[in-house]
Amino acid sequence: MTSFGSQLKRVVVTGLGAITPIGNTLAEYWQGLLSGRNGIDVITLFDASRHDCRIAGEVKGFDPQAYMDRKEAKRMDRFAQFAVSASKQALADANFTINDLNAEQVGVVIGTGIGGLKVMEDQQEVYLTRGPDRCSPFMVPMMIANMAAGLTAIHLGAKGPNNCTVTACAAGSNAIGDAFRLVQRGYAQAMICGGTEAAVTPLSLAGFAACKALSNRNDDPAHACRPFDRDRDGFVMGEGAGILILEELEHALSRGAKIYAEIVGYGMTCDAYHITSPVPGGEGASRAIQLALKDAELSPAQISYINAHGTSTPANDSTETAAIKSALGEQAYKVAISSTKSMTGHLLGGSGGIEAVATVMAVAKDQIPPTINLENPDSACDLDYVANQSRSQTVNAALSNSFGFGGHNVTLAFKKYVP
């Protein structure tokens, strides 16, 4: 029975799933992060020879039929395949069974920045070359952004709250934060949440290149994504999905669930400044960090680790550094910070999902992933970015930052579960 009382409930993470450029399971992804594995290479999903940027973090060896039958897979865009598959992983990891008794108490919030862009591109070609009557009847349900959340619910039988956040590169983190609020306030006992994206497509690549946002280090893809390095020249696109199972604490304890961490804070702001550029000085991002800390009742001194947005673009990395300094004060110089995008590339709306997974694992395992390719730090980026080698260190509390076009800023706070 749903309770909508004023008493806020504690919310814990009990399951994780990941489909990424460095591994298609949680174990593969985590070991890839700790070992500094590079997931960026020459694009193979299509012929990118005409593009200025010809590299990306592609998901390799992914077989959707490991999670669904062939007919179902054919009726899903890749971004939805990733979401459903990672959600099934996370639910299995949580040892959580959805049945007739609890289905209405389990919800889904999965964010994406773009949705089914590949299907849209393919069907536009069909329209132009073969005519409107040859377009697929599945085009719209394959294309629309909410279908990752909708199909996940259909496949898993989750009948509770269902939503899709579309806030550019903050979408995955917004999804987790919104799911946190739903469980915290008693609207659901458990939520399947995170982010997904499959936007390594010709049109997407061309569009981001036209914005001058992408790295053109085509001859050296392994070192193309280099957050906080003075020689960075843009971000590298990635794809995949990261999913968390959030569960009301008492419900988790009643079924003997393992608990990775407790989610305790969610900060969300807007720069209200520019469609693509962050506000100078990172004022909006700083406020998001401060709001997450206030929500979590954590002080800056209690933060051990920050999984940075860290895109490897000239504007983001220095601005995020300034925001962290503004929000944490002197503690900014003592906290370990890393950008796992250096290994996976930038999953856009999916990035908050896989990065929250990484943050939760850092809290659970007391290990911090590195920022690879950090060889010559930018003088404006003078914090501890855990350069090139992972670190064993107690992580009592951690933050995950995500910032998106349109000025969206999100920070999530996690800490060790203490009874």
Image (cartoon, rainbow, N blue to C red):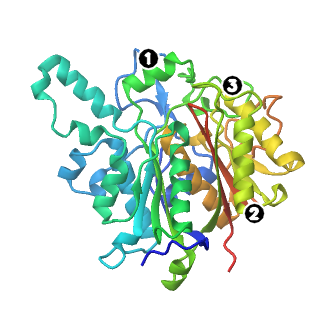
Q: How far apart are the alpha carbons under marks 2 and 3?
A: 33 Å
Left or right of residue 143: residue 174: right
* Residue beneath the point at 12% across and 20% down: 130
Q: Nearer the viewer, residue 175 or 236?
A: 175
Q: How far apart are the alpha carbons under marks 1 and 3?
A: 21 Å
Circle 3 residue:
314
Q: Nearer the viewer, residue 339 or 111?
A: 111
Secondary structure of residue under mark 2: loop
Q: Residues within 10 Å of mark 3 (few under 14, many from 20)?
A: some
Q: Residues within 10 Å of mark 2 (few under 14, many from 20)?
A: few
Which mark is on residue 51?
1
| Front of the two marks 2 and 1 | 2
Q: How far apart are the alpha carbons under marks 2 and 1?
A: 48 Å
Q: Amino acid at mark 3?
A: Pro
What quarter of the picture does the C terminus occupy? bottom right
Does label 1 or label 3 sit earlier along the sequence? 1
Indicate the quadrant where residue 116 lies: top left
Circle 2 residue:
297
Q: Amino acid at mark 2?
A: Glu
- The reply to whether discs 2 and 3 touch (Cβ–Cβ < 8 Å) is no
* Residue beneath the point at 40% across and 17% down: 49
Indicate the quadrant where residue 371 lies: top right
